[in-house]
């Protein structure tokens, strides 16, 4: 149906609506995804809290905060570089934006490698999804589920950064697409702010 | 506002927020080494985490510069979800200590 069909003698029929909240549709869709994903992570973290609160022999296996502190620093820094990329894109500096997006992707890869290194260390100490040498087996299941879900998000983010970055550099995407991608990347960072205290810091060996 | 006003903001504000977030993250690590009970530690860490999340959402995700109606939309949905997930805590206590508010056996 064409616009002319929707309009009768110069009067609109009311069927042509603008985007919700007057923000671009892609951006609104990303916000809806973020709200939905907030539910997913909140559900996982509350379930984790439920188990931790209700289990007497909950393990506290973490001896050092060095690795998780480094991971936090890397992820927060990647949020800043993403902002620099968006700023360059809005200023029509295509090369600069692409460079910042690549730096963000590299920081994401560093984060993922640090995460995998930590997993391998815990697996080496005998922790799996179904058992660990310190206490209730629920710990391994909840730890790997929550951190694994976050790592999956980071991995998808890295792929999206590279895909959108290359297409932006090739002229197929514009600054609005970088902004939408940035929303996702900052959300991944935001979730980490809750994962660190609940999953790592409350389980430090004192 | 939004795009034009954002263009005029300098990178300085982003760096200040970044440093604040780093400081708050460091504060969580300091709290982890305090000699306090787990419930108190959890509360302090969650307060810091919510401040961090608020800063990230308002400034990094530019939610603060969006239309007020959209800000309310996101806030209401998110808070409703977070509150809705709090119903299970009494069951969690029951796993450890038995049914809450139950009478002792006669």
Image (cartoon, grey):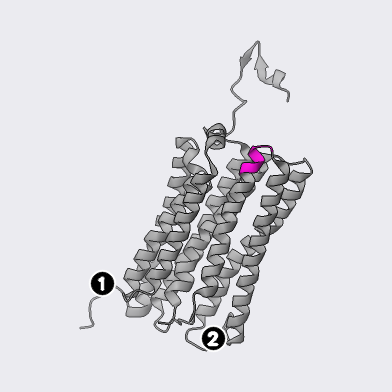
Disc 2, SS: loop
Q: Please give the residue where the numbered disc 2 appears in the rendered image.
A: A132
Measuring from the top left, give residue B60's x and y in whole percent: 52, 48
Range shown magenta: A87-92
Considering every residue shown, the one lying at the far left of the view is: B106
- The answer to whether residue A172 is magenta is no
Looking at the rendered image, the quarter that the C terminus of chain A falls into is bottom left
Which chain is disc 2 placed on?
Answer: A
Q: Residue at x 61, y 18 (%)?
A: A12
* Closer mark to the observer between disc 2 and disc 1: 2
Measuring from the top left, give residue A170's x and y in whole percent: 79, 44
Q: Residues within 10 Å of mark 2 (few under 14, many from 20)?
A: many
Measuring from the top left, give residue A103's x and y in whole percent: 67, 56
Would you say the magenta stretch is mainly helix, strand or loop?
Answer: helix
Q: Please give the residue where the numbered disc 1 appears in the rendered image.
A: B101
Measuring from the top left, give residue B5's x and y in whole percent: 52, 33
Q: Residue at x 35, y 70 (%)?
A: B41
**Answer yes or no: do the residues labelled 2 and 1 have beta carbons within 8 Å?**
no
| A76 up-or-down from B57: above or below | below
Disc 1, SS: loop
- The answer to whether residue A89 is magenta is yes
Does residue A175 appear left or right of residue B87 in this picture?
right
Considering every residue shown, the one lying at the far top of the view is: A9
| A180 up-or-down from A118: above or below | above
Q: In the image shown, does B79 or A65 lie closer to the viewer?
A: A65
Looking at the rendered image, the quarter that the N terminus of chain A falls into is top right
């Amino acid at each position: 149906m064409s616009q002319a069909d929707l309009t009768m003698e110069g009067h609109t029929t009311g069927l042509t609506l603008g985007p919700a909240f007057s923000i671009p549709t892609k951006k609104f869709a990303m916000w809806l995804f973020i709200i939905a994903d907030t539910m997913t992570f909140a559900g996982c973290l509350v379930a984790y809290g439920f188990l931790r609160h209700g289990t007497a022999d909950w393990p506290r296996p973490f001896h050092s905060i060095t690795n998780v502190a480094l991971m936090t620093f890397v992820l927060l820094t990647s949020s800043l570089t993403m902002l620099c990329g968006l700023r360059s894109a809005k200023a029509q500096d295509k090369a600069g934006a692409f460079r910042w997006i690549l730096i963000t992707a590299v920081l994401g890869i560093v984060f993922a490698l640090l995460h995998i290194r930590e997993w391998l260390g815990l697996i080496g100490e005998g922790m799996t999804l179904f058992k660990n040498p310190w206490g209730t087996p629920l710990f391994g299941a909840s730890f790997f589920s929550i951190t694994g879900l976050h790592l999956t998000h980071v991995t998808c983010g890295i792929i999206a950064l590279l895909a959108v970055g290359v297409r932006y550099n090739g002229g197929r995407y514009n600054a609005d697409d970088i902004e939408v991608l940035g929303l996702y990347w900052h959300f991944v960072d935001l979730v980490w702010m809750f994962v660190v205290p609940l999953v790592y810091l409350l389980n430090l060996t004192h | 506002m939004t795009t034009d006003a954002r263009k005029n903001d300098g990178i300085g504000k982003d760096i200040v927020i970044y440093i604040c977030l780093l400081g708050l993250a460091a504060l969580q690590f300091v709290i982890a080494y305090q000699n306090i009970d787990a419930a108190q530690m959890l509360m302090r860490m969650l307060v810091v985490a919510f401040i961090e999340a608020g800063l990230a959402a308002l400034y990094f995700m530019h939610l603060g510069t969006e239309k007020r109606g959209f800000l309310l939309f996101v806030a209401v949905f998110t808070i409703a979800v977070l509150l809705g997930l709090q119903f299970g805590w009494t069951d969690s206590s029951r796993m450890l200590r038995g049914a809450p508010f139950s009478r002792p056996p006669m």
